[in-house]
Image (cartoon, rainbow, N blue to C red):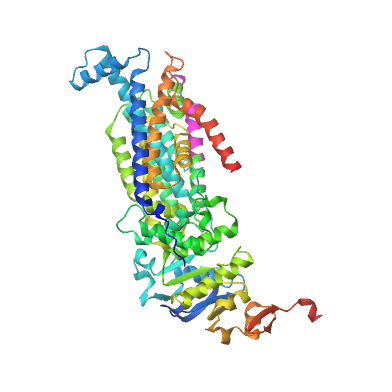
Amino acid sequence: MQTTAQPTFSTAHTRGASRAWLVLGALALLALASILLACSVGSVALSAADLFGAISEAVRGDHSTLAATLLELRLNRALSGFVVGAMLALAGVLMQALLRNPLADPYVLGVSGGAAVGALAAMLFFTAAWAIDMAAFGGAIAVALLLFLLAHRDLRNGAVEGNAPFLLLTGVIVASGCGALVTLMLSIAPDNRLRGMVFWLIGDLSGTQLRWLPWLVLAGALIFSTRIARAINMVAQHAEAAATLGVRVGPLRKGLFVCAALLTAGAVSSAGSIGFVGLIVPHACRFALGPDHRLLLPAATLVGGTFLVLADTLARTLIAPQQLPVGVITALIGVPVFLLQLHHMRRR
Amino acid sequence: MMKTIGLQLRIGERTLVAGLDWQVHAGECWCVIGRNGAGKSTLLRTLAGLREADGGAVQVGGRLLPDWPLQDLARERAFLAQGRNDAFGYRVLDTVLSARHPYHDAGYWESDADYQAAHAALHALDVGALAERDVRTLSGGERQRVAIAAVLAQDTPLLLLDEPANALDLAHQVSVMGLLARLCRQSRKAVVMVSHDLNLAHSVASHALLLMGDGRWQAGPVAEVMQAPILSHCLGHPIEIVRHGSRTIYLPVEETHHE
């Protein structure tokens, strides 16, 4: 074996780390900018000066002025949008790594279907917002548990070529079962509740309240997954053969599944099933930054949050004073972007 | 280095290997020979710890496989799987660096030594120029050489290779076999590989393990085991041996000659 250690490679690892920090710093600034934009745009536009005035008032605890009230409302909504988008994007990356399929999204295994069944049932029988969120979360977790039990062997061993077809098929079938239940409830729902149900299904941030739980789930999942990002790379590359490189594939896959399911449940129960964020954001990040999960996981989280904040800003300003459900915007952006990426992939 | 004790391999109701007592020492290059479905890949996967034995045990370095921490074991033996399925667009360099994973208890990012090992392995397999390429754009033979480079970069005393010459062109078949022979002779590594090409196997192997596919097996030095009658029986097809100078050439007897 001849050794050709070019001097250019001697600092390669420090380059990897500093590139990651640079990219993440830039993305964090973009995320901040998107939130500030979301705070200033709306039925009453706030100029930069108004915005900073309002921020300083808010910091002092003074909510009397119009600007401060607007800021509080919009900031709440922007932050909920950010956390939901970030959760969906992170769940997407994890699900794609788990299934070893770059076209998987957080909804493919039916976790969101379970949330939809729960949420719609709650809308049919109760009306309180918290009951709907709770029911959605419960439904998502129930489906996740069901999948976990059914596909337990598959998760532990990894299927023969690591494509997890059993888990995928189980998920698809469970999802279509949930779809049937959703249709059933829509068809027997009274007319006055139908609009809310449809909005929930498309994904809507207008009724969302800022809560701590989604942030906790997001932070926990991000820290957990970034710490084991090296091992995620191994499984993404080598499937079950990653075991011969010292990775405990079974526990890792279970961890990924639990994380992705919790993130999806958290996102869907606070804003409905907003489509495409969990599919195109991981895809675009992988396309631009490469598939290394050490960078991809935090980057996709930031980009997902930013994307949803911007999409929601569009949703409430495009045909103001009427508001669109944000799921419409993400789908309208997502479909062409995704088709373009697919086309690009085929050409390569 | 590696030892099997009464190893049993079964698929469904079929017994592929029964009571395999077998030892591999440093510096030996073993070739596993058998028909399709005789259990060659199953054996290798079992030795690699990807599949539980159906009876008996496998020892590496005097320690039973289940007793090894995976990370430590990954510094003892490397495994080349038969096929690869690349779902994501990792660079060639990334896939070879991934083989350095067992050496990373502390670091989050790869060290200089990892990069050096990866580049050296890529050059040894004549794929240094492909380092920045997306693995999904490689040809079958290029991909195979990159996979072998990863096994080299893992830098283990024991190598388990499932059809390493698969998809390689003639020149690279010869150079890869030469590389494996050097690893055994000079670096005292132990190689266990599956090969369907008897001539290629004979050019590099010091020992052979024949699997009959019904539980029976035969192991020994090449000169003892790779003889026409035994191989003909093992592979289910008459085989002739032709001497050409110092070389031995295995030829399948053509069916038409028997008419």
* The image quarter in which residue A310 lies: top left
Vertical arrangement, residue B108 with respect to residue B246, above or below: above
Which stretch appears magenta? Answer: A176-192
Vertical arrangement, residue A321 with respect to residue A345, above or below: above
Which residue sits furthest right?
A: B259
Q: Looking at this view, is B8 or B197 the one in front?
A: B197
Q: Looking at this view, is A46 or A164 the one in front?
A: A46
* The image quarter in which residue A270 lies: top left
Which residue sits furthest bottom?
A: B224
Tell me if residue A186 is in the magenta stretch: yes
Q: Where is residue B127 in the image (x, y as percent from the top left)?
A: 53, 59
| Residue occupying image coordinates x 55% and y 67% | B164
* The image quarter in which residue B101 lies: bottom left
Tell me if residue B212 is in the magenta stretch: no
Q: Looking at this view, is B163 or A69 the one in front?
A: B163
Quadrant location, the N terminus of chain B: bottom left
Magenta stretch: dominant secondary structure: helix
Quadrant location, the C terminus of chain B: bottom right
Work out whether residue A104 can be spotted. yes
Q: Position of residue A192 (x, y in %)?
A: 44, 19
Q: Where is residue A2 in the image (x, y as percent from the top left)?
A: 46, 66
Q: Is residue A82 left or right of residue A331?
A: left
